[in-house]
Amino acid sequence: MPKSVDLRKSDILFLEVQRLVGRCLLLVLGLFVRFMVKNYYRISVEDQARLQNEYRVLIAGAKGPLILCPNHLTMVDSVIHAIFLNSIQGYFFNYASLPWSVPEHTKFYRKWHWRLVCYLGKCIPVLRNGPPEESRRTLAKMRYVLRRGDILSIFPEGRRSRTGKVDTKDFSYATGQLLKLEESPEVICLYVRGKKFGGFADFPNRNEEFHFSMEKIKLHSEFKGMKRARDYSSQIIQKLHTMEDEYFANTVSRQ
Amino acid sequence: MNQTEIYNEVVALIKPFAKNEEAFLKVSSESKILEDLGVNSARLVDIVLDFEEKFDIEVEDEAADNIRTIGDAVKLINAKIS
């Protein structure tokens, strides 16, 4: 078991049991969710084989804690990412590759079936603007799963983009707050864009086809403390913004 | 620098981030920065970094977490510079 990071034993036990139960029920939940996404909602991604191969290579080459940082479009982004980044069999044999998500507690834990999906789908609830002790506890849980070798997914913008484009002005520093505690953190920046989707939405359109592009970056900062957190978050947002520019440049050149 | 001067500087630094302009007109030491003044929690980090620069101090994460009101910020800065 990995070294504790100021986390209660009960929290560690809870995370380990959650992980075990999730893995045991992965085939049932995973196949159901995959059916809903791919067959019922008919959502797809361009060049899935290339994408999954790229994801495998990126996570295999990681030398330490690995965080997935996608831009944020809809309420079910984490589900979409999980379905397309690896196969259900791939997750079963390498369960660490299924990223932990950090959904907002008040939004995602109101209904029992959402709670169940969050529990089985490797989620750590986050209470926005909660008491500092609770935030520190949540941070410790995130660090625990990272130390354990699992991947953690955090939206660096901190909220869904109101324009559908990466928000380079009003983004959160929460990702930086976590990363500044890790040595030589590695981040996979994931840029996602629905070809039919143009703005703020709860769910993607039916028959949506997504574009996914990924790049791994190693973060460096000369700063310390909160300045480092801001610097790290800014570097990630800047990378996603560059990837977005590349996407649009390629889209225009193809037309 | 006395408490009143620190208070005025703190209010001036928070002003650009306060979304609730009406509440800002009635700002006091008891005003809660996030809840009353409508400052986004992410921007609270920017405000604390502005405090560091303006008053030439260093604010630890835990101390920053405990800043809830304008009065908390003034008290913290006063303790750091005196």
Image (cartoon, rainbow, N blue to C red):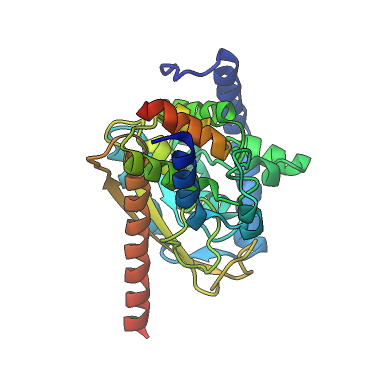
> Which quadrant, please, contains the N terminus of chain A?
top left
How many marks on residues?
A: 0
Q: In the rendering, at what x and y percent does residue A226 appear?
A: 37, 38
The reply, left or right, for residue B23 in relation to residue B72 is: right
Residue with the most extreme top position: A9
The reply, left or right, for residue A53 in relation to residue A106 is: left
Q: Nearer the viewer, residue B41 or A153?
A: B41
Q: Nearer the viewer, residue A41 or A188?
A: A188
Vertical placement of residue A12 versus A169, above or below:
above
Q: Is residue A53 visible?
A: no
Residue at 54% from the left image edge and 41% from the top image edge:
A101
Vertical placement of residue A175 versus A19, above or below:
below
> Which quadrant, please, contains the C terminus of chain A?
bottom left
Q: Nearer the viewer, residue A38 or B11?
A: B11
Quarter where residue A63 is shown = top left
Q: In the rendering, at what x and y percent does residue A43 appear?
A: 58, 64
Residue at 63% from the left image edge and 61% from the top image edge:
A39
Residue with the most extreme left position: A222
Q: In the rendering, at what x and y percent does residue A87 appear?
A: 49, 48
